[in-house]
Amino acid sequence: MTGQADRFRALPRRLRALPLRSRLAMLVATAVAVAVAAVAVACWVTTRERLTEQLDTTLSQIKPNDTVTRLLTTSCTSGLPSDLQVVTGPYTIQLVPAAGDRPCTLPGKSAIPIQEDDRAVALGQRKDATHTTESENGTAMRVYTSPAGPDLAISVAVSMKQVTDPLTQLAWVLLIVSGIGVVGAGAAGLWVARAGLRPVDELTEAVEHVARTEDLTVRIPADGEDEIARLSRSFNSMAAALATSRDRQAQLIADAGHELRTPLTSLRTNVELLARSDDTGRVIPPEDRKELMASVKAQMTELAALIGDLQELARPDAAQPGPLQVVGLHDIARTALRRARLRGPELTIDADLAPWYVRAEPAALERAIVNVLDNAVKFSPPHGAVDVRLHRGVLTVRDRGPGIPAEELPHVFERFWRSPSARQLPGSGLGLSIVARTVHQAGGEITLGAPAEGTGTVASLRLPGAPVPPPEL
């Protein structure tokens, strides 16, 4: 018993091990088999009931004539010769006395045992009775009993073969037709599964091809609006996104290598000059040595800033914002202004910051505002002025520098892009890219453009928020 239970529990695992199309074919065949079996059983039961009803109607309509009744009465009283033949066709007719255990049956017919329903009819307790029983020779008989006089009833019976033989034939027909239907359903299910899963096979082949060759240019035809077409379009979108991501990664590495090469080359040249001076004993003039050391320090600072920006872009959570908090944009701007004033002490930085509360990542937002202010300080002329305004969620930073040509504005937020006029200034070309990403993650937008009057550039950061903090603060 335990072994059978184990085999039963192992059956689902074996089914899961089959190919999907085989499981679908088996599912279709099983569903059809259950439906056909239910219909066949219902048809067989309905036919049996109808045949039995017709047989009962026929038996109830048979009325034995006076001769047969008289012979039966004589048989009950004095008996009849055993060689007497009375033609009653396939029917067995017998008298059922109210008292006694044996009926009076015509010669040549096997007696049918008296049932309680028959005796109740003979006693006048029932109008009639119909039942199925076996005669003394073991034949299944259908019996209809009706009153025949005082304390007598007469039973008319016929073999149940009139019902069982057609039912047997019907059962064989249903079995054969059901078998053909189940086999056909299994074959049709297998064909449908193969046809329906052909796009899945193509998708599988495409995935295996991508995994084997890393070729992300593979696309699957997606026709229609069904689930398979949606899956194919999703795969194509994923492959395109992966290809774009890989291209951007390759471009980032190439751009980073290009940006790192310039300060590294300059740094290497300066270090080699200092090392050659120490090796040859030729003293570099103090002013020249001081300039070399300042250049080395500036290049190391530029390298550190570039590496920091690359780490910011490459960190795993760069694409997703950190924990968002409700912070005062005006407070963060004041902190960034203090840092900007330290970097440009000779500049005049005029600030007017109205309260504005936003939901953002505080550290990332502060870094973004610092980058914008650093650009304004870097491009401002000596003893110039920088205006910082925050009004209803719009933070504007204006410098009086050379400005950005209109044809270069579409590129200012691209990674490693630097204006030709700014290539001699320190920077990595990643600052505004980081600013744009941070602002977009906070649900805002940033734009750069020329001021309405005068020279310079105006950076505008628009962030959704409110002039007062929410109640939980």
Image (tube, grey):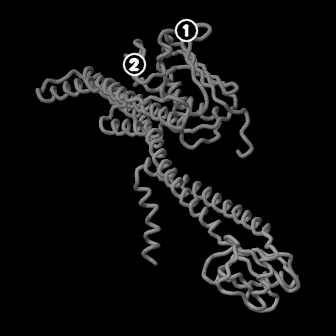
User: Which amino acid type is marked by label 1?
Assistant: Thr
User: Which amino acid type is marked by label 2?
Assistant: Leu
- Which mark identifies residue 455? 1
Callout 2: 10 Å neighbours few (<14), some, many (20+)?
A: few
Q: Position of residue 363 (x, y in %)?
A: 53, 38
Element carrying mark 1: loop
For the residues labelled 2 and 1, the Cα–Cα distance comes to: 19 Å
Tag count: 2
Q: Which of these two is toward me, 325 or 63?
A: 63
Residue most toward the left? 280
Element carrying mark 2: loop
Q: Position of residue 469 (x, y in %)?
A: 71, 39
Horizontal side, residue 442 vs residue 210: left or right: right
The image quadrant that residue 7 belongs to is bottom left
- Residue 118 in the image: above or below residue 175: below
- Which mark identifies residue 23? none
Horizontal side, residue 413 vs residue 143: left or right: left
Q: Position of residue 172 (x, y in %)?
A: 53, 60
Quadrant where the C terminus sits is top right
Q: Identify residue for label 2.
A: 425
- Residue 421 in the image: above or below residue 248: above
**Who's the residue at 83% across and 81% down the image?**
121
Q: Position of residue 213 (x, y in %)?
A: 30, 35
Q: Which of these two is toward me, 226 or 212?
A: 226
**Who's the residue at 37% across and 33% down the image?**
307
Mark before the other along the chain sequence, 2 or 1? 2
